[in-house]
Amino acid sequence: MKADDGFGPNSWIARKARGPMGLLYMLSAVLSVVMTGLVYLFVCLKAWAGAFGVGSITQYVGAINNLFLGISTLIQKLGDMRANATFLEPYFDLLDTPNNMYQGSLTTEKRNDRQYEVEFRDVSFRYPGSDTYALRHVNMKFRVGSHLAVVGMNGSGKTTFIKLLCRLYDPTEGEILLNGIDIRKYRYHEYMDIFSVVFQDFKLLALPLGQNVAGTVDYDQSRVLDSLEKAGFSDRLAELSKGLDTSLYKELDAEGVEVSGGEAQKIAIARALYKDAPFIILDEPTAALDPMAEAEIYSRFNDIAGDKTAIYISHRLSSCKFCDEIAVFDHGQVIQKGTHESLVADEGGKYYELWNAQAQYYTEETSD
Ligand code: ADP
């Protein structure tokens, strides 16, 4: 172990232990030894002078020692608190990060008919600190209940498009409208309620499976089971002896289970389904999957999306054939829109080019 790493003799932790924390520990140790001596002396002298019988010495010494033990523990705890506060500082700094995003005050209408219409109107976007546009003049209207696929090469702006839709960033130019009103005017948390998103870099926690799906400690068990089934996780669930109470991973529970990339993805999809929002967005949901698992997710897509407005991002075109509409992104722009049949018929178009470039790969690796 190097002398200057976290736990070495010259590390900052060791220096702290020698500083304020060490001082408090030393004080508490010295105090308890000195006080015990004084207590014995005092009580014995009193007994000797005839204040009480010799038999009471133990009782008095015990009582007073207990009192000082309490005081010394208290001082030790103050030392611990002081030392640990240093470690907590970065977390509090992070939690205190100011949110500079404009917070609107409109409430999003709670609609049972799920008639939420979102429109991108001439939206352009540059990431903070970047000179180049990641999106350029994007116009798009999502039809309620339709299933839209967003395709394009890596770096063409697909994920950025979703990030703007979910208001992780605000457009540099143009506006995004929900039922005709700029999304910036809505309360952020209420706006987020209408989206279920599975990003590529989703995270599962070392907690029970049911809690991972629901995102809460108390959940509706039948809905969690239903979501897991729709996401194709039922077979694996049947193998788990503790069912929804099975912990994922072993960090907090030695009996926890490790899940594969594909299984993790299904759990993440189940989490999105449990939220039951009007929009469901899957960002490259099959990127981590083997061809078999990938084909399974495609075949379930219509089940998964149901009557929701669904957006499905992929750079594999075969996974998008079943969508009502396909938008082709290229260098931050939407260059083509239409159904698979109409796009593949346009021999001069990017979609045709991508489709043919990938066609051989599909016939080899997937069974569609
Ligand atoms: P896709 O999802 O189609 O692969 P992205 O939306 O991730 O594409 O990226 C679009 C462009 O934006 C790329 O040129 C990428 O380098 C850039 N980009 C993505 N994320 C960031 C970021 N956080 N900061 C700066 N540039 C970014």
Image (cartoon, helix red, strand yellow):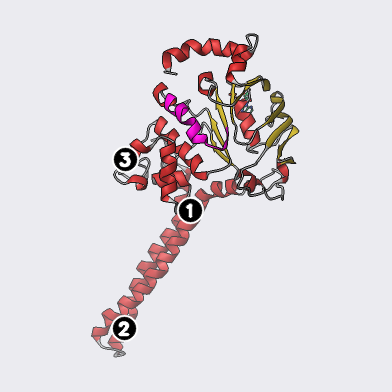
What are the residue bounds of the magenta stretch?
295-310
Question: In the displayed structure, would residue 297 be above or below residue 189?
Answer: above
Taking the magenta stretch, the answer to whether it contains residue 238 is no
Q: Amino acid at mark 3?
A: Ala
- Residue 115 x, y percent position in the rendering: 64, 42
Q: CA distance from mark 1 to mark 2?
A: 41 Å
In percent of the image, x 34 and y 80: which residue is there? 42
> Majority secondary structure of the magenta segment?
helix
Depth order, front residue of 273/167? 273
Mark earlier in primary sequence (2, 3): 2
The residue labelled by disc 2 is 45
Is disc 3's CB within 8 Å of ligand 1?
A: no
Q: Amino acid at mark 2?
A: Leu
Q: For this view, does 365 lie left or right of residue 353?
A: left
Taking the magenta stretch, the answer to whether it contains residue 299 is yes
- Residue 185 x, y percent position in the rendering: 73, 45
Residue 238's mark? 3
Question: In the displayed structure, would residue 335 be above or below residue 184?
Answer: above
The residue labelled by disc 1 is 83
Q: Nearer the viewer, mark 3 or mark 1?
A: 3
The answer to whether residue 153 shows anywhere in this view is no
Q: Amino acid at mark 1?
A: Ala
Q: For this view, does 282 lie left or right of residue 253?
A: right
